[in-house]
């Protein structure tokens, strides 16, 4: 399959996580804790199968300390993600999440001693200004606590990404992270899962999010990312909030305002400027 088509499918899967979660919580089909638990456990089970198919036996490497760290990061990401979507719209949540992830990875890039060019500083300034504009008092201002939770979710996902990147085998890293996070969910399930607030529709949406949008989506991403440049991969991920905004408007009847479009252009455009400045000539 052509890399462009694979990339498009993967980005739709990533955006589907926001839409499925918001759809389930908006309709009160399930509570945030139960959605998180079912999403991670179903993702873990799916990855057992996919890992066996995709990764050869001799390439499978497991590390308990790594799995614990990756699982803790993934669990934090997924739980904060679900709770934040109790009030955030699909598009706003995706914008906060992916904006935070990209800016965190850029910060890690700086921390490793890499120099930042003037054009990169300009891009960072525009993105941060977009975040500030998003949180300024207005009728469209998202709830501060929910926004903060989504930022924490983004930080946790960035940590998980860096762990996977440094592991040398991202597919193994994703699998171990999901398995450890699933185990955490099972251990705390008496406090996370509330049977009285679970409906069949909520369960289906959580399973779709875990098995397809998460597990299959992440495996697809790491299959295609080796065939993309850094700039192409970054630009592709910046399409996710736009897809979530469109999906939220079409499927969830969420209002797509001029202010939200402007904020999106500032945050995503600034990050794009950074990657354009960094791309080797």
Image (spheres, grey):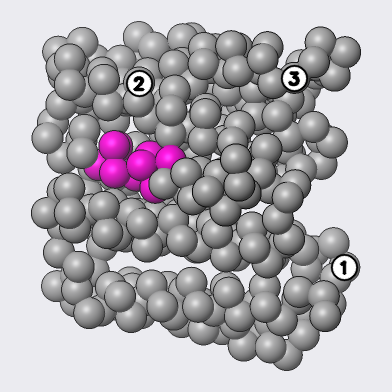
Which comes before the other along the chain, label 2 or label 1?
A: 1
> In the image, 29: left or right of 183?
left
Dot 3 corresponds to which residue?
55
Residue appearing at x 60%, y 12% in the figure: 48
Number of marks:
3
Q: Mark 2: few, some, or many residues within 10 Å (few <14, many ≥20)? A: many
The circle on residue 207 is 2
Does residue 82 belong to the magenta stretch?
no
In front: mark 3 or mark 1?
A: 3
The quadrant of the rendering that contains the C terminus is: bottom right
**Which class describes the residues within 10 Å of circle 3: few (<14), some (14-19), or many (20+)?**
few
Tell which circle, 2 or 3, labels the residue nearer the N-terminal end: 3
Report the front residue among 238 and 78.
238
- Tell me the SS state at disc 3: loop
> How far apart are labels 3 and 1 at the CA level?
34 Å
**Which residue is pictured at 60% across the width and 18% down the height?**
50
Residue 267 seen in the current view: yes
- Relative to 231, say whether 65 is above or below: above
Residues marked 3 and 1 touching at CB (< 8 Å): no
Task: Return the residue at label 1.
Answer: 113
Residue 229 in which image quadrant: bottom right
**In this picture, which residue range is highlighted in magenta?**
13-22
């Amino acid at each position: 399959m052509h890399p462009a088509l694979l990339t498009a499918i993967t980005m739709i899967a990533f955006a589907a996580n926001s839409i499925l979660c918001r759809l389930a919580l908006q309709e009160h089909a399930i509570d945030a804790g139960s959605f998180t638990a079912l999403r991670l456990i179903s993702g873990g089970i799916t990855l057992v199968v996919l890992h066996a198919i995709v990764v050869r036996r001799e390439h499978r490497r497991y590390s308990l300390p790594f799995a614990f760290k990756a699982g803790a990061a993934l669990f934090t990401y997924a739980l904060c993600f679900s709770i934040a979507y109790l009030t955030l719209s699909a598009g706003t949540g995706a914008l906060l999440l992916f904006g935070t992830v990209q800016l965190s990875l850029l910060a890690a890039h700086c921390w490793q001693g890499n120099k930042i060019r003037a054009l990169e500083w300009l891009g960072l300034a525009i993105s941060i200004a977009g975040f500030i504009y998003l949180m300024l008092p207005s009728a469209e201002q998202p709830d501060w606590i929910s926004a903060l939770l989504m930022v924490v979710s983004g930080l946790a996902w960035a940590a998980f990404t860096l762990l996977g990147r440094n592991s040398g085998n991202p597919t193994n890293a994703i699998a171990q992270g999901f398995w450890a996070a699933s185990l955490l969910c099972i251990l705390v399930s008496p406090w996370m899962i509330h049977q009285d607030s679970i409906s069949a529709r909520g369960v289906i949406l959580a399973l779709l999010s875990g098995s397809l949008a998460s597990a299959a989506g992440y495996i697809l991403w790491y299959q295609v990312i080796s065939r993309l440049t850094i700039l192409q991969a970054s630009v592709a991920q910046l399409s996710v909030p736009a897809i979530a905004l469109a999906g939220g408007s079409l499927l969830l009847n969420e209002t797509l305002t001029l202010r939200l479009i402007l904020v999106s252009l500032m945050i995503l455009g600034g990050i794009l400027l950074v990657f354009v400045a960094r791309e080797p000539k």
